[in-house]
Amino acid sequence: MPTTISKKKVLKEWKLYLFILPSFLFIGLFAYYPALSAVYHSFFSWSGGDTKEFIGLDNFSRILGDTVFWGSFATISVLAIANVFKMIPSIFLAVLIHRLSSERWQYWYRVLVVLPMIVPSLVTLFIWKFFYDPNFGILNQFLDATGIKTLLVGLDHFFHWDIFFQNVPVAWLGESALVIPALILWGFPWIGSVSVLVFLVGLQSIGSQIYEAAELDGVSSFQKFLYIEFPLIMTQVRVTLVLLIIGTLQSYGLQFLLLGENGGPGGRGMVPGLWMFNRAFIAGEFGYACALGLCLFVIILLLTSLNNKYVRVDK
Amino acid sequence: MNSFDTPPSPGPKKNEWLSHLVIWAILAVELLPFYMMVQISQKDNLLFLENPWLPASPSSWVWENYAHAFRIVFPYVANSIVVAVAATVGCLLFSLMGAYFFARYKLPFSNILWAGFLTLMLMPAITNIVPLFVLLKQLHLLNSLYALIILGMAGGQIFCIYMLRNFIEEIPKDLFEAAEIDGASHWLQLTHIVIPMCGSILATLGILQFLSSWNDFLMPLVILRDPELYTIGVGLIYLDGEYVKHWGEIMAAFLLSSLPMIVLFLFSMKLFVRGLSQGFLKG
Amino acid sequence: MERIFNAIGLGLVALAFVASLGRVAYLNWNKAAEESTKYTHIRLAHWQLERGIRNAFDEAAREYEKLHPDVRISQIAIPDRVYTNWLTTQLLGGTAPDIVELGFGSSEDRLAKHFLSLTSLANRPNPYNKGTNLENIPLQNTFYDGMMGGFYPGLMEFYGITLTTNTIRMFVNLDLLKEITGSDSIPADYQELISVCEKTRRFAKKFSRPIIPIASSRYNAPYLMNRFFSSQTQKQTKKIGPPGDFPQNAARTVEAFVDNAWSLDSPDVRSGLELMRKIGREMQPGFMQGTRDDALFYFIQKRALMITTGSWDSSNISSLANFRYGIAPIPTPSKNDPEFGPYVLGTISEAATISGMGLGVTASSKHPETAKDFLLFLASKTGDQRFADTSKLLPAVMDTTPSQAAKPFQINEEGYPPGFNLVASSDWADTSRILNNSYFKLFSHGGNVQEFVDTIRPDFLTAYGTDLARMYSARKRASQRFDVKLAADIQLLSCPPPTNSPAERETKTREAKEKVDLVLSSLNGNDRSTYYLREVGEKLQNKLLSSPR
């Protein structure tokens, strides 16, 4: 625990404050000042220049009627829920690796799991975009080669989607109905390098005698997962989940690069962050963008506190 | 699913092959982008169209792809290295100092400062991007690499201080006390006790910080104007916007821009894996 | 072991850092030295990533630097996909380059706020034309179109200086054509085009080769589709008549629609849509989702017999195609066409094409005079000639000769004006959206014209109304802007600024008077067109209210 230094002694130890000074300056200038400035400017009509006009709560009342903004929450909710399910492969892989008997293999699999991290995320992004290319992308080639395409066309006939046709390449990012499915499929098989490692750390705390006991009781492997392994990584899962949801709510880089500043065909890929970016750096409505950001902040804060209150899992 | 029934115990098990198979299958799909990048980078458009899936025979490799890609990507890589290294070192240094302050002593205002720092963890970075842009404009930092370095330093600060504080607090007090008796200053204690004791967490934070700097493209896109300043993030976006796509060249450029990380990874694989695993144990 | 590896890794990072830092510092130092001492640095940003055009800008820059050794000019090419965002950011951040290509992201509002008016340049002779036959002619009149591509009617000012003219042509892979039809003759009329397309499809099927007749994309298709559609509305447009000096004939089209002079069920409109469907069926499936580079890729990789695109793609195609190709005008149906002839007046003339690729000077430029001077240099007779020769584009200045490569793109002035289109320009955003969202009904395998019309019908009139209302309010705002300007100029006229020389005072007064006259006359025109927009809008509203929905 830190040693307490009283107010009297502090004059002698004033040098210690120098240690916090750089961090304090950085955070004050590049985190607190912009945040306060955002709050301040959300009451103005402002395009980033020296002139601004106080308009009271106009920006906020505009947000209430902003169908694009609220519509974008529908999109981001779907993506966030999908992201929760996308954790399953990581958990599955971690458990698989953990149950291996060979330490050597366990190590090398960890290395392989980490490998994708060293490819710049933009490169991964562009390669996936290339996978989705209607004419040259491997996704369509895969669907054609395996006959899944025929199945989709059949389903299309049955349900009248009007999306899939024989001999017509599927435009994954060009068809408004396919934008969200494409975003969900993105990054298959959704292995998060850090998550797998974190889950593995959690799993390591299981002693081998527990397994032996389970073995004697003839517990099936799924039960073993359910009653021994999953409870132990619950904390990690919860933390990852919270970070994931907050991260998803903030994210817009993928949508921006993939679908453009307007969220792609029919605006179906519009997420709150992108709408804020769009208002600021496309329309030049900085004041309104600040108000949007503030709303987003409040919503994220609300979610975090809700999570802390109700989803708490005892260690 | 037989293989699941085997508890981990020393010694080889016969029926684990299914697990291995499943793991390999998952990893294969996971690493598919990487494979595609490498094999397409060896082909020209014609070759790629004829045979999009399998690697070309080495005799038909298009080496010009790499030469061309190198010319494009090299300046971006250089800029990115400067930004990422400087931002990482700066961030680690300052947060180490900050963490030392919080972990060792309880001074007046410590609590307020700590609370102030923690609130920021809840604040989504995205709300700041607009005023941050205006601030950089007022500081005349737009269109410069300094802006990216400074933002990189400031951005990771909170998280690093938070992580490091826990680690420093767990260093045995006797070590510090002994040093103090010898008359070591705070700075000496930091460099001679804290840094050696926090090696693995520092490495982990460093790697994460480096990666986030390396991968950033939204701030560079907004900040940088001149082509000679582009970091990998912006450079690749502009490369992707070309009207005539030479997929081989593009993939070669992608490969080259991953190369620094690959080399770094090869040499510090163990640290990478162990650091990432352990770093979160205490966090 | 691990320690050693870590050390090597760390060492490599340090080494790479030092090397990179050295490089960056050196570049920075060089740049700083250049900027602080001898050079005036001018930056030019555009989205013309085509190699020929980049080279042309480079060449012009080097030539200009030879004339003015104290100036350095560099270009920044930004992909069109991020151009709007990029330009907005730079303008708001005050870091915008000195010269910027106008188009994406430069709305009238932004032009007025962040760009310098070039009207006075346009009204004066170009000094770089000295010694040529254009020596004493005001800049705008040295352009064959009066430099209308750089003129913004809503602001009544010139903000851009244009360099080229673009036309749409059909590129044909002659090697493939010979293989398919046995001859090199490019289809000259619509019937031939359709028959070649049919032959291509049969050929592709027979030899199971993946060849499509026409490569297209959501970027390329509208140009072609508009051309074909407007061939069918020629006669009707002649009847409606262009409304005098009004710049946007589109409003007249809307008025005619409101007056029931034409409708979505008129035989000519139906015929135009039928024609669009026929052409669309010859393009690769799903072309409306493809991007510009997709279409180009098909053609370059010999997977398409033809591509229809603008002259801007010419340098790309010439540098990449490893086959013989021909360039020909787009063969719209002739008067004698058995199927689509009845509504055709004749060949469509391109006389109304205006010059493009306008370059503007930003208000934040540190050296606006140098930037303007460079633009004048580019827009001079020799400058534009050189630019056109290298970029293989058509020049925009009078008395220049197009390069051999640009000959096929020369404006075809003969013929008759084109008819109206359902959407005239990008100003008609809502109408465009309605159409774009429904095009798949028109072009897809299972769709047809009737289905397309039925889909757009419910919202069509409303969309016209929304667009009209938006244009009307923009015009009104522009009028109000004029009031302020007018007041300022009159002020200047009544009390000229104090100067020492009477000659200077006289020029100032004369200039102010000219400006007032110009503003008054344009205001007059603007008011008339604004009034007309309102008239049409009111009619439309009445119709909307009376029609049962």
Image: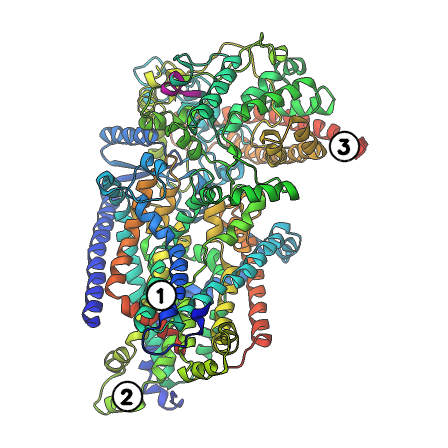
Q: Amino acid at mark 1?
A: Leu
Chain letter for the residue marked with disc 2 in the picture: B
Range shown magenta: C170-178
Q: Position of residue A306 (x, y in %)?
A: 59, 72
How busy is the neighbourhood of tag 1: few (under 14 within 10 Å), some, or many (20 plus)? some
Left or right of C283 on screen, residue C540: right
Dividing the picture into quadrants, the one containing residue A272 is bottom right
Marks 1 and 2, Cα distance to the nearest angstrom? 29 Å
Residue that mark 1 sits on: B208
Left or right of C173 on screen, residue C27: left
Chain letter for the residue marked with disc 3 in the picture: C
Q: Is residue C177 magenta?
A: yes
Dividing the picture into quadrants, the one containing residue A294 is bottom right
Which residue shows up at 55% across the image and 70% down it? A304
Residue that mark 3 sits on: C544
Q: Amino acid at mark 3?
A: Leu
Circles 1 and 3, Cβ within 8 Å, touching? The answer is: no
Q: Is residue C345 above or below residue A119?
A: above
Marks 2 and 3, Cα distance to the nearest angstrom? 84 Å
Circle on res. B176: 2
Q: Amino acid at mark 2?
A: Phe
Dividing the picture into quadrants, the one containing residue B207 is bottom left
Q: Is residue C269 magenta?
A: no
Tag nearer the camera, 1 or 2: 1
Left or right of C364 on screen, residue C472: right
- Residue A42 visible? The answer is no
Quadrant holding the C terminus of chain C: top right
Q: Position of residue C394 (x, y in %)?
A: 39, 20
Tag nearer the camera, 1 or 3: 1
